[in-house]
C-alpha cells in the first residue's frame, strides 16, 4: 500500500501514548481514535510539511510544479553534500524549494530545517511494515501488520508543539499543566483536531503545513526499527508520571525525533478506520 490516508470523516487517529499511559500502550503500533472536537490533558500534536500530499498527483506527474517543502531523494543528497562542504548558498536553496528555511543544517540524524520557531526533520521516503506482529506484547486487534510505502520524503517537527509555540500563534494557552518555570517547553495539550487545523492555518506561508498521516507518523516513529519501540522505554518516553514534561528531554530516535512515544498522544491527519 502506498501513502495510505483517509482525509474525510470522523473520528481521527492519535498515536504514541501519553504521560499517564501504562507501558503497554506506549508502542509504535498503538492507535486510538477520537472525534475531531475532542480534547484531553494528554493529547497534543506535532507539525508536518511536504511529502506525497504536497505533490499534485503523485509519482505519475513528477513533472508537475514543485510545491514548497517537497524534495526528491536526489535533491536531499545534493543538499547534504553542499552542507557538508559549506556551500549551501541561497541560490541552491531556492533551486530545491527550501528558501523558506531560516536555517538548514546537517547533523548525525540527518537534514534539519529551522522555520517559524520550529525545527523540522527531513524524513526520507521508504517502505516499512505498519502495525504490530502477532507476537508483540500488548498487541491490539486494530494493529494488523502490512507493508506500506511512503513514496516521498516529508518534514516533521523535531518535537511536539510546545505551549509557548501555541501561545505565540494563537494568543492563548489551553493547557492544563502551566505550573512551574518549565511550562513554555512542555507540550501543548487540551487541543482538539479542529484546534490543530486552526493553528496550522495561521503558520507562515511558504510551506504546506499539516498533521502527519498515521502511516507517516508510525514510519517516522520507527525510524527504521522493527521492534515495538525505538529504544528502551525508560530512555525514550515519559509515561506513568504525574504530568507532561518538557519536550526533548528523553533520547531521540535515529532520525532525531523526540517524544514520539509518551508525553502526549499525537493527533494524526487521518480519518480513523479499523483495519
Image: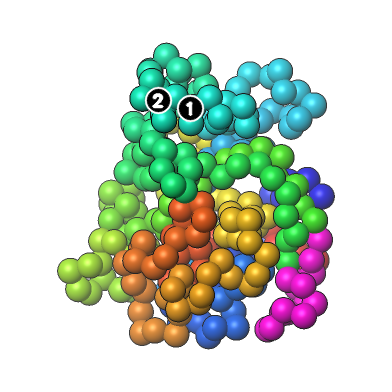
The disc at residue 85 is: 2
Residue at point 56%, 76% (across, down):
26
Tag 2 near tag 1, CB within 8 Å: yes
Q: CA distance from mark 2 to mark 1?
A: 6 Å
Residue at point 41%, 29% (across, down):
83
Q: Nearer the viewer, residue 162 or 9?
A: 162
Compared with 250, 59 (above or below) is above
- SS for tag 2? loop
Q: Is residue 135 magenta?
A: yes
Q: Residue furthest left?
A: 181
Q: Which residues are magenta?
A: 132-146
Compared with 1, 88 (above or below) is above
* Horizontal side of residue 136 vs 40, given as left or right: right
Compared with 185, 152 (above or below) is above
Query: Residue 119's quadrant in the figure?
Result: top left
Residue 203 image position (x, y, % from top left):
40, 40
Query: Residue 58's quadrant in the figure?
Result: top right
The disc at residue 81 is: 1
Q: Residues within 10 Å of mark 1 (few under 14, many from 20)?
A: few
Residue 23 image position (x, y, % from top left):
54, 83
Residue 187 image position (x, y, % from top left):
37, 64
Q: Nearer the viewer, residue 204 or 121?
A: 121
Q: Residue furthest top?
A: 91
Which color scheme does this rendered protein use? rainbow
How many numbered callouts?
2
Compared with 232, 113 (above or below) is above
Amino acid at each position: 500500500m502506498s501513502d495510505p490516508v483517509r482525509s474525510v470523516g470522523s473520528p481521527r487517529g492519535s498515536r504514541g501514548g501519553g504521560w499517564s499511559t501504562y507501558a503497554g500502550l506506549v508502542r509504535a503500533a498503538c492507535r486510538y481514535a477520537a472525534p475531531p472536537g475532542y480534547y484531553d490533558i494528554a493529547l497534543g500534536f506535532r507539525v508536518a510539511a511536504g511529502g506525497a500530499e504536497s505533490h499534485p498527483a503523485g509519482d505519475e506527474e513528477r513533472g508537475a510544479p514543485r510545491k514548497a517543502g517537497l524534495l526528491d531523494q536526489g535533491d536531499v543528497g545534493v543538499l547534504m553534500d553542499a552542507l557538508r562542504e559549506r556551500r549551501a548558498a541561497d541560490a541552491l536553496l531556492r533551486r530545491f524549494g527550501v528558501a523558506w528555511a531560516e536555517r538548514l543544517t546537517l547533523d548525525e540524524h540527518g537534514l534539519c530545517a529551522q522555520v517559524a520557531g520550529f525545527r523540522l526533520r527531513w524524513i526520507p521516503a521508504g517502505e516499512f511494515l505498519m502495525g504490530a506482529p502477532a507476537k508483540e506484547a500488548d498487541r491490539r486487534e486494530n494493529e494488523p501488520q502490512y507493508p506500506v510505502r511512503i513514496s516521498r520524503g516529508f518534514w516533521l517537527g523535531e518535537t511536539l508543539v510546545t505551549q509557548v509555540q501555541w501561545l505565540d500563534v494563537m494568543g492563548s494557552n489551553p493547557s492544563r499543566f502551566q505550573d512551574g518555570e518549565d511550562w513554555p517547553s512542555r507540550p501543548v495539550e487540551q487541543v482538539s483536531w479542529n484546534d490543530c487545523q486552526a493553528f496550522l492555518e495561521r503558520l507562515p506561508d511558504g510551506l504546506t503545513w499539516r498533521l502527519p498521516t498515521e502511516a507517516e507518523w508510525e514510519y517516522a516513529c520507527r525510524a527504521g526499527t522493527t521492534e515495538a519501540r525505538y529504544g528502551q522505554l525508560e530512555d525514550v518516553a515519559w509515561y506513568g508520571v504525574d504530568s507532561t514534561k518538557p519536550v526533548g528531554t528523553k533520547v531521540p530516535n535515529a532520525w532525531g525525533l523526540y517524544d514520539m512515544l509518551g508525553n502526549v498522544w499525537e493527533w494524526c491527519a487521518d480519518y480513523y478506520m479499523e483495519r
